[in-house]
Every structure is written in structure tokens, then in C-alpha cells.
Image (tube, helix red, strand yellow):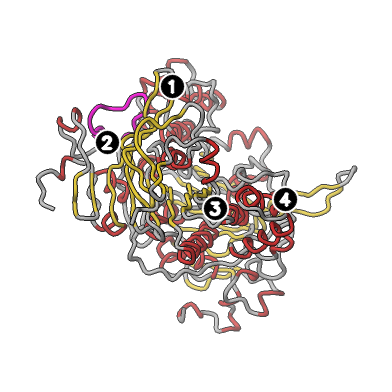
């Protein structure tokens, strides 16, 4: 059977003063039904550009230059706005980081939930409201009958994120793209939201593409993980591959720089330097300047994705010549 | 703990809610409502809690960037609240603050040199331009920035570098105490660890005392010697960092710790998921503020606010579970 979502060799570029520069390059991954794929990396690694490319919500100066995005076997790249609009919000839904600014402040909660139902199904106004209440109940909002007639400012951040999820779930999507869904929330509220997402995934066999910088969230939520650095996939594998046998120096550095709750550390490991900017992308491996193992070859040539095991690949010359 | 450098007793900050044409005060938002703690010289005191718990307001009232409504703040034996404006200004040489947002807290029209030398000018710490330049170069070097970049503007620096500029600015007047309000929250993890290590080094070199305010529990635990946990304007628990994590007593601290996602796919998770949201500090619940969300709430919690007590040496908690009439030290059984 086809993958639910299969992205191949995706290259998305943005128009700058120096012409089109790629924000992500040669990005490939897939998401299956009922599984959560984590896309992890730091600011500027291209994780959000990847999700916006799938949704084709790139800003006017951005465009997909190469690659395919197959959803249920159908290539989304090159679809017209009208065709894409039929998929967006119905088969593929998205939730964003900012629950404060993603809701329209001048419309009632119920109306905002019913909006996507109105667009994608021919539900009447009354049915729309009834369905909105059902959805609010589904995402665990108390007093749904009253909340449906409230405005967003009356709700807390956690409640607004639940409303966003309710909107996303309205048309029973097959794929949910969640871009840093809990980053703006407190930990106890984050725990509630993650719990809700896990439950919805199980109940509906939905695929989730979870974009986050938080490795703790990844460990808890994801089945498989893609690690991105400066617009490239540097490592991918099952969640245990990444945490038990991290193989890219960047992944190792990232894991070592998190302070651990359980143990006492005198000093944190850190990765020296910063992410290269899109204008000054180095020729060879993009991590070479910060890598403790870099050789002259890393500066000039770029490694491909090499297998570590059947489920695990890494983009690093260190892997070369090591038997799988 | 060594001799306290800073002592805070029953600190309060109430923001009035005004209504009507005469701006009559109809109520108060009790942002900080009776917080007490002491910080020893050379120590790092962590303040944790979720948004709206009053941790940042606490930090700012200590420097009187916000005037406290009540309570006593003693710094090196002097009552900070009794100081005049001029005296307070001089006092701020000893107490500095580093803010969360490295993008918003630097003036975009000031070069790094101007930003770092401003406190030197205000406090009259360097007589000549050449001396200021030397001092700026020295400070940039201390925080790991190349002094050759002192004539650049903040936008030419990354988030982590900007936070280093903020730290250099705070260090310019050679303070004894630095209040760091979410200093690494806006940074990526790999950069966050660089800044945490820097703060650690500076503390050792310059014998600094930190009040470290953050919502990220793993970061606070890493850097702090002792930690205070706040909920809705009140301190609910205070203990040595290791002790607090090994044996959290307050049900809120327990829930907070269990909610932190662990970067290990095989970690055992006994998560306590709190129901509901933080109540409004303008209209807090009766009794213990935490009781509507508490898994262990008893009848007494609904009517009576718990007292702040030391249940083990150095470990304070405000919770009826540890009341003396209930056997006092139920922590042994938990």
C-alpha cells in the first residue's frame, strides 16, 4: 500500500536579493496512517518550510523548485489553488504554534469551527453548531454548549489550542500537521494537549507530522524521527534509533546539550558556533564548521544519506565503510 | 547557606483593577501575594512556575522596577524599599537584571559598544572614552564575543550572541546580584547550553549571586542550588534543587515535574495530568489556591489557606498534607 504522505527530494526556495536560495534541499520522508513522524531541528533548519510546502501555504516569494509530495499517491505539487483548497482543512489539517493569533478575534468559537464544515460539507447552520459542540467535547473542552458562543479572548492558551485542534479535526482529516503545537504552552497544559493528540491519533488512525524543537516531546510522541539541520535531513530513523544510537554528530550534540532532570551535571555539552545563514551556505557538509569530527573532505564534499540499519540513515562520512 | 545577601519577607505586589469614570478600585490582581525567601552570596536561587504565577513580577519588584505593594526586601542589610530614587539608582549597581527577549531588550539604534557602555556612563564608572572602550572590550571578551565587533548593531548578531550582549551589559557595573528572567527561553537548545555554561563560569570567576527565573524545570534544576516553586502569586515549595526533584512534596510540584517530557522513548512515565487551567489571580479560589486542580484535595483545603512550614531541614512547603495535626511528616510515606 502507498504511504499516506510521501515527500521525495523536495527543494523549496525563497526569492532574495541574491536570487532564489533554497531553504530546504533534497528532503525526503514519509508518514503512514496511524503513526506520528517527528521533524526536529533548531531555528532555521527548515522544519516549518517543510510543513508549509506540504500544505502549499508558502509566502509569495517562496516556491517548490524540485521534488514531489504524494498524498495517497496523488502528487500535490502543481495542483491549482482551487484543487489544493479542497484538500487543505479536509484531508490534511494543520495546527500552528500560536493559539493566540491563529483564531479570528471577532468571530465566535462555534462559527470558526463550523467554517471548515461549511466549506467542505453541505451542513446546515444548525447542524454546524451541533457538530461544533460535538467537536469541542471531543477535544475535552468543558461547558461546550456555552463555549461555542464565546469569543477567543475569553479562553486561555491551552483552551485556544484545543479549539484549534477541534477546527483541524472538523472534517476528520487523514493527516494532521502540527507545527510546534505546544511550544507556547506551560508544561502541565502541554501534557494535556499531547495526551489529546495521542488519543485522537489512536481513535482515528490519523497520521501526524509533528514539527518540534523539543526532543522530550519527540521521545514521547513519535514513532519515527527526521532530524534536520540547515535545510537538509541529517538523520532519520525509528525513535529508538535516534535516542539509543544517534549517529550524526549534530544529533549527538543536540541530545547532549539538554539538561537532564534525573542526573546532576556539572557542565552541559554544547555545540559551538551557530547555524549558517541561507545566504552563506557552505559547500560541503553544512554542519562541518561546528563538527568535532570534521575533516578537509567534509568542507568540500557533501555526504549522502548512508544506511546505519534497515530503519536508520545518516548523512555523514563517518558512516562510510562501516558495515550495516 | 552562607550569610544571606538578599532577604525577602512577605513580598506583595497587587495591581489594582479600576472601573468606572472615577477609576474606583474594584479589586486587585494579586500577582505576588506574600512571598518570602533568602538568597546567600554566591548562590543560585531558582524561581519556577507557569505563566501568571508571579515569578517575573517577583524578580522585578526586587529591583524596584515595579514598586512592591508590601513586604520587606533587605539587600546586604539595607532595606531596599526605604531608599530614595537616587539611593536606589546607586543600589542598582549591585543588582542587575537580564531579560528574556534578546531581540526586544537591546536598542536597535545603539551599537554594541554604546549598549554596553551606557551603564558605565550612568554610574560614572569610567572617566575617559578610551577607558570605556577598554572596559567594553574586556566585557565582550568575558562573555565570549569578539571585541572587534563592538561597533556593530544588534541585528548583526544571533539570538545567543545578543543574550551575551545583555549579560555583558549587566556585568558592566560589577554587580553582586543578577536577576536573570528567562534568560535562555528564547534560545535553541545547543545555544542555550552555551549561555548556561557561560553563566556558570561567570558566577565562579566573579562570585556572582543569581536569581534565575524560568519555566523550564530541567534548566532551572541544572543551574540552581535551591529552588522556589510558585503558583498563583504564592510560594508553594522551597528546597535544595536535588531534594526538590528527588522528593517533591507539594502536589503541584509533583504534577509539574511529572509533566516535563523526558528525552528518552523508554522512560517510565507516571504522569499526573492536571485538570483545568490556572484560576485568575484577580479572583483566586478560597482556601488553598491549588485545591480545585489538586488530586489530594481534602475538605480543609477548600476553606483554609495552608501555612508555610519547614517539614524537613531546608525543605519548606505550604500544603495541608503536611500539617502537624495530621502527623506532620507524611512525606516519609509518599
Q: Of callouts 1 and 2, which one flags the residue occurring earlier in the amino acid sequence?
A: 1
Real-space Cα separation, disc 1 to disc 4, in angstroms: 39 Å
Q: Nearer the viewer, mark 3 or mark 4?
A: 4
Kindly check if marks 2 and 3 are in contact, taking CB atoms under 8 A apart as contact. Answer: no
Closest to the observer, A287 or B88: A287
Does residue B71 appear in the picture of this structure?
Answer: no
**2 or 4: tag closer to the N-terminus:** 4
Tell me if residue A167 is in the magenta stretch.
no
Magenta highlight on residue A284: yes
Q: How many marks?
A: 4
Q: Which mark is residue A185?
A: 3
Residues tagged by mark 1 and mark 3 found on one chain of the structure: yes
Whichever of callouts 1 and 3 sits on the residue coming sooner in the sequence is 1
Residue A108: mark in rendering: 4
How far apart marks 1 and 3 lie (CA) works out to 33 Å
Q: Residue at x 47, y 49 (%)?
A: A177
Q: Is residue A120 visible?
A: yes
Residue depicted at 46% across the width and 68% down the height: B271
Q: Earlier in the sequence, mark 1 or mark 4?
A: 1
Q: Numbered disc 4: what chain?
A: A
> Which residue position holds label 1?
A16
Amino acid at each position: 500500500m502507498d504511504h499516506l504522505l510521501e515527500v521525495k527530494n523536495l527543494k523549496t526556495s525563497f526569492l532574495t536579493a541574491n536570487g532564489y536560495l533554497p531553504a530546504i534541499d533534497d528532503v525526503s520522508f514519509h508518514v503512514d496512517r496511524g503513526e506520528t513522524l517527528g521533524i526536529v531541528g533548531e531555528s532555521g533548519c527548515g522544519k516549518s518550510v517543510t510543513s508549509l510546502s506540504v500544505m502549499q501555504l508558502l509566502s509569495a516569494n517562496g516556491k517548490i523548485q524540485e521534488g514531489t509530495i504524494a498524498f495517497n499517491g496523488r502528487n500535490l505539487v502543481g495542483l491549482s489553488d482551487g484543487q489544493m483548497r479542497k484538500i487543505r482543512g479536509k484531508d490534511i489539517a494543520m495546527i500552528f504554534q500560536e493559539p493566540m493569533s491563529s483564531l479570528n478575534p471577532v468571530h465566535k468559537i462555534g462559527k470558526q469551527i463550523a467554517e471548515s464544515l461549511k466549506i467542505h460539507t453541505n451542513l446546515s447552520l444548525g447542524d454546524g453548531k451541533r457538530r461544533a459542540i460535538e467537536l469541542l467535547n471531543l477535544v475535552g473542552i468543558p461547558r461546550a454548549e456555552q463555549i461555542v458562543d464565546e469569543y477567543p479572548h475569553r479562553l486561555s492558551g491551552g483552551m485556544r489550542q484545543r479549539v484549534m485542534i477541534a477546527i483541524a479535526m472538523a472534517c476528520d482529516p487523514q493527516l494532521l500537521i502540527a507545527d510546534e503545537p505546544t511550544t507556547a504552552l506551560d508544561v502541565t497544559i502541554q501534557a494535556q494537549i499531547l495526551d489529546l493528540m495521542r488519543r485522537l491519533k489512536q481513535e482515528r488512525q490519523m497520521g501526524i507530522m509533528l514539527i518540534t524543537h523539543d526532543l522530550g516531546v519527540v521521545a514521547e510522541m513519535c514513532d519515527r524521527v527526521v532530524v534536520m539541520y540547515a535545510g537538509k535531513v541529517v538523520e532519520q530513523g525509528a525513535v529508538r534509533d535516534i535516542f539509543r544510537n544517534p549517529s550524526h554528530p549534530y544529533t549527538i550534540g543536540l541530545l547532549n546539550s539538554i539538561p537532564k532532570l534525573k542526573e546532576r551535571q556539572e557542565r552541559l555539552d554544547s555545540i559551538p558556533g551557530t547555524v549558517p545563514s541561507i545566504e552563506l551556505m557552505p559547500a560541503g557538509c553544512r554542519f562541518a564548521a561546528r563538527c568535532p569530527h570534521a575533516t578537509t573532505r567534509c568542507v568540500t564534499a557533501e555526504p549522502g544519506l548512508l544506511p546505519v540499519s534497515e530503519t536508520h540513515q545518516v548523512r555523514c562520512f563517518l558512516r562510510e565503510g562501516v558495515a550495516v | 547557606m552562607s550569610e544571606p545577601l538578599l532577604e525577602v519577607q512577605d513580598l506583595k505586589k497587587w495591581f489594582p483593577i479600576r472601573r468606572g469614570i472615577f477609576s474606583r478600585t474594584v479589586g486587585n490582581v494579586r500577582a505576588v501575594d506574600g512571598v518570602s525567601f533568602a538568597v546567600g552570596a554566591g548562590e543560585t536561587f531558582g524561581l519556577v512556575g507557569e505563566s501568571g504565577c508571579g515569578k517575573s513580577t517577583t524578580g522585578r519588584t526586587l529591583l524596584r522596577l515595579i514598586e512592591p505593594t508590601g513586604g520587606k526586601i533587605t539587600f546586604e542589610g539595607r532595606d531596599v524599599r526605604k531608599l530614595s530614587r537616587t539611593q536606589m539608582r546607586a543600589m542598582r549597581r549591585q543588582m542587575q537584571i537580564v531579560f528574556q527577549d534578546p531581540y526586544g531588550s537591546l536598542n536597535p539604534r545603539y551599537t554594541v559598544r554604546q549598549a554596553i557602555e551606557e551603564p558605565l556612563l550612568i554610574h560614572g564608572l569610567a572617566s575617559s572614552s578610551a577607558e570605556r572602550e577598554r572596559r567594553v572590550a574586556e566585557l565582550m571578551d568575558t562573555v565570549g564575543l569578539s571585541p572587534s565587533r563592538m561597533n556593530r548593531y544588534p541585528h548583526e548578531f544571533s539570538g545567543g550572541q545578543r543574550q551575551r550582549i545583555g549579560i555583558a551589559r549587566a556585568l558592566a557595573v560589577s554587580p553582586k546580584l543578577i536577576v536573570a528572567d528567562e534568560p535562555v527561553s528564547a534560545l535553541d537548545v545547543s545555544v542555550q547550553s552555551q549561555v548556561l555554561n557561560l553563566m556558570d563560569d561567570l558566577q565562579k570567576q566573579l562570585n556572582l549571586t543569581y536569581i534565575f527565573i524560568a519555566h523550564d524545570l530541567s534548566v532551572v534544576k541544572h543551574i540552581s542550588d535551591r529552588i522556589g516553586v510558585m503558583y498563583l502569586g504564592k510560594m508553594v515549595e522551597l528546597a535544595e534543587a536535588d531534594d526538590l526533584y528527588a522528593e517533591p512534596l507539594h502536589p503541584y510540584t509533583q504534577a509539574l515535574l511529572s509533566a516535563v517530557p523526558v528525552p528518552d522513548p523508554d522512560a517510565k512515565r507516571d504522569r499526573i495530568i492536571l485538570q483545568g487551567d490556572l484560576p485568575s489571580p484577580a479572583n483566586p479560589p478560597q482556601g488553598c489556591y491549588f485545591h480545585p486542580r489538586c488530586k489530594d484535595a481534602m475538605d480543609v483545603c477548600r476553606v483554609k489557606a495552608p501555612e508555610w512550614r519547614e517539614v524537613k531541614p531546608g525543605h519548606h512547603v505550604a500544603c495541608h498534607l503536611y500539617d502537624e495535626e495530621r502527623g506532620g511528616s507524611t512525606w516519609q510515606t509518599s
